[in-house]
Structure formats: structure tokens, C-alpha cells
Amino acid sequence: MNTINPQAQELNEIIEATNPYVLNMLSEKGKNIFFPKKGILAQSADAKGKEINATIGIALEEDGSPLSLDCISKLISLDKNNAFPYAPSYGRPDIRKTWKKMIYEKNPGLGSICISDPVVTNALTHGLSICGYLFGNDGDNIHISDLYWGNYRLIFNNGYGINFVTYSTFSGEGLDIDAFRKALLEGEPTKRIVSLNFPNNPTGYTPTESEMQQMTSILIESAEAGNNIVALIDDAYFGLVYEDGIAKESIFTYLANAHQRILAVKIDGATKEDYVWGFRVGFLTFAVKNGTPLLYSALEAKTAGAIRGNISNSSNLSQSLLNSAFCSDDYVSQKKEKFNTLQNRYEVIKRILETHPEYKEAFSPLPFNSGYFMCLTAKNADAEAVRQKLLEEFSTGIIVANDVLRIAFSSTPTNLLEKLFNNIYLAIKSIQN
Ligand SMILES: Cc1ncc(COP(=O)(O)O)c(C=O)c1O
């Protein structure tokens, strides 16, 4: 790597002055990145408001509005200026402000804890990848429970050479807290990247409030032992919790002010929460005990720099559409309506499992209480063989990963749930050893 750019150095010094542990958490790439304040962006800013501004890298009509094709603009009722030009690499200021307000509203436990402004990513996969860029060196480890979203491998391992160190997800009906404790406390103090994803893909599990407290205590204990912890909090399915007593707030709330050696990184977005999978709008938000706006502005600048050098910026059209949806009067009630659809499917599945004791001969459900999915383990039958049987003889598709069957009730109409579980039962029975 070349010698460090003075703009990156300046950000590192700001970070170090407030919290040296956070500087230690950054990867080599993370230490070197900065959001260029000089060059093209600075020169464009200088030209703002001038009679002739020949700096901007987009095309304008003779009247100064964005030049556009009618066959596209006629489909968009938003102001052209909110759709066609580039959005800033940080994201549109309006949606960043709205989302931040929403994070506080959805997580009242945050109270007045100071968190960063969210930086807009091209949805969560990109946000996770940017975390790999900022925090992961080749050969670093990530602690993750053994049931996780498969794409993490491409993002962290293929993308940044980060090794997976797994611990068991469940013990009985809840989380394997002992395994989590062991993962976070064994070995010499070091930087530790920890992945936390609730509601979880694939299991559909969110910790109980007490489990979340216990995880928080373990993370604090680990920080007190000298570990510098980057907690990557993937909140893709945030808000879809269907039972009482299950944590309704993100673990980000618990960690935001927990310890100076714990950097909580919230990776969230509209994809699953707001049912806009193809819009590609997500956010990265940081919090650490005693974090200051200056520290956060340095982390935001590094994030925006990584984005600038990677995708440049996220879709302006999608950000504008979502910001106006978030500010609309109908947003909350419409969101509740769709939540009810998913919750109802969850309740129906619980009922199906309760009313069919014979299913216990064929499979056991893993703990689930939230999100888009639930998982089953097949008894005396190979999971992949079950999947093949379901495809071939029952016209039914499910996912198999890590030897468990993952059922996406998010995408199964309620009236087909009964049949789905019956098909699984029959398929397993037909191939049981
Ligand atoms: C746990 C988890 N995180 C992140 C994502 C990716 O979301 P996005 O489509 O916003 O990239 C998914 C999508 O399946 C997911 O299950």
C-alpha cells in the first residue's frame, strides 16, 4: 500500500483522539480510506451558484433541468431532480435524517445515546461488504453462529479473506449462550469481529430479552478482557417479531453505549422491513460508548469514501421514493397490515405443528419466533434427499443448508401452509432410514 493519504491520516487522528480502540478495529483498507474533500467534488462545490457551472458530470437540458428521455420520465411522478441526478455517496440528506429518526423511534431504549448519521448503502449485502472493507484484514476471524445466511461466505470470506469461526446456535429451546461466551472469551485479547443477525436467517429466531441481556453482558466481559469488538448487527428483518418476551429492539440498542471497546455497527435497510427487495437501499450506522459527532463524522467519511470507490452512490430514485413513503401518513398503518399477514402465517404454522403430533416422527422444528423463515431438521433422512423428493414428487421447493430444511413462510400463501407441511411429512416418511 502507498503511504497514507493526508486526508485519511486526518480521519485516523480524529478517531484515535476520541477512541484509539476504534482505530485498532479498522482494517488496513479502513485506515487508508477517506472521502475526498479535494479534487472533483471540491471543485464542483466551489462552482455552486455560479452563472455558468460547467463542472457537473451529468447532462442538463437548456433550461438547466436534468436532461432525460421522455419514455423514462413519464413513468416517474417524482420531481426529476430527485430521481435522475446522482445522490451523494453518503446518501440523500433527507432519507439519512428520516432513517435516523426512525432508528430512535423503533429502538426507544436508545434514549438520547449519540449515534452516527446513517450512511446509505446499496442495500444490506453492500453494507455488509463495506463492513468487510472497513474492518476485515485477510486472515481475520469472524465469530458467527453455525446457522447463518450463506451469502456471508461470499461477502466476508471470498471478498476479504475473513475466516469463519462458528459456535453452536441453539441449546434446547433457546440460544447456546455458553457457546457464545466461549467464542467471545477464549484466547488472547485481540480484535474480534462478531456477526449478530436477529431475526435470523435461516432460523427465524430472535433472542428473548433475557438472552439479549446475557449476550450483551458477555460482549462487555470480553471487552473488559481487552478484546476490541466490532459487532456487525445485521438487522435485515428488524421489526418482524411475533411473540411477547422476545427482544423487540435491536441488539444495537444494547451495545450502543456498552463499552469503549465495542463498536456497534448497524446494517439495516428497507429491503425486507419495507418489502422493497429490488430497490437496493440500506444503511450503515455506528455507535460506541462516549462516541462523539466528530468521531462519527470520521467513520461516516471513511464509509462514504469506501462507497465512492466502489459503487460511487446508491439509487437516487429509490432513496427519494422511500423517503416520501416514510414521511407519508399511511406508512405506519400499511406496514402494520403487512406485518399482520406475516404474523398470521407464523400463527398458522404454530397451529399446524401443534395439531399434528405425527409430524414429530418425521421432523423437529428449530426454535423460531420472528422474521421470514423457520427451519426443520429431518429425522432419519438426509436433508438434501428430502428436498429432491419434495421437488420430484410433491411439486414443493424448500432450501437446504447446513443439513436443515428452511421454509420461507414469507413467500408461501397461508392457504398452502397446511399442504406444505404435510408434503414435507410425507416426503420424509417415504425415505426414512
Ligand atoms: C440476514 C440477511 N442479511 C442481509 C440480506 C441482504 O439483503 P439485501 O437484499 O438488502 O442486500 C439478506 C437477504 O436475504 C439476509 O437474509
Image (cartoon, rainbow, N blue to C red):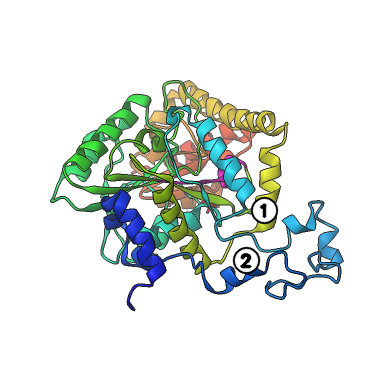
Residue at the spot 52% in from the left edge and 39% down from the top edge: 372
Secondary structure beneath disc 1? Answer: helix
* Label number found at residue 287: none
Q: Which amino acid lies under the numbered mark 2 shown in the image of this protein?
A: Ala
Report the Cα–Cα distance between label 1 and label 2.
24 Å
Ligand 1 neighbours mark 1 (CB distance < 8 Å): no
Foreground: 129 or 427? Answer: 129
Foreground: 418 or 148? Answer: 148
**In the image, is 62 to the left or to the right of 405?**
right
Q: Is residue 220 above or below residue 138?
A: above
Crowd tier of the residue under label 1, counting other residues whose Cα lies within 10 Å: few below 14, some 14–19, many 20 or above: some
Which residues lie in the magenta part?
A: 265-274
Secondary structure beneath disc 2? Answer: helix
Ligand 1 neighbours mark 2 (CB distance < 8 Å): no
Q: Is residue 383 above or below residue 301?
A: above
**In the image, is 305 to the left or to the right of 289?**
right
Residue identified by numbered label 1? 318
| Dot 1 or dot 2, earlier in sequence | 2
Q: Which amino acid lies under the numbered mark 1 shown in the image of this protein?
A: Ser
Q: Quadrant of the C terminus?
A: top left
**Circles 1 and 2: CB distance less than 8 Å?**
no
Q: Position of residue 281 (x, y in %)?
A: 59, 52
Q: Is residue 311 above or below residue 280?
A: below
* The quarter of the displayed image where residue 48 is located: bottom right
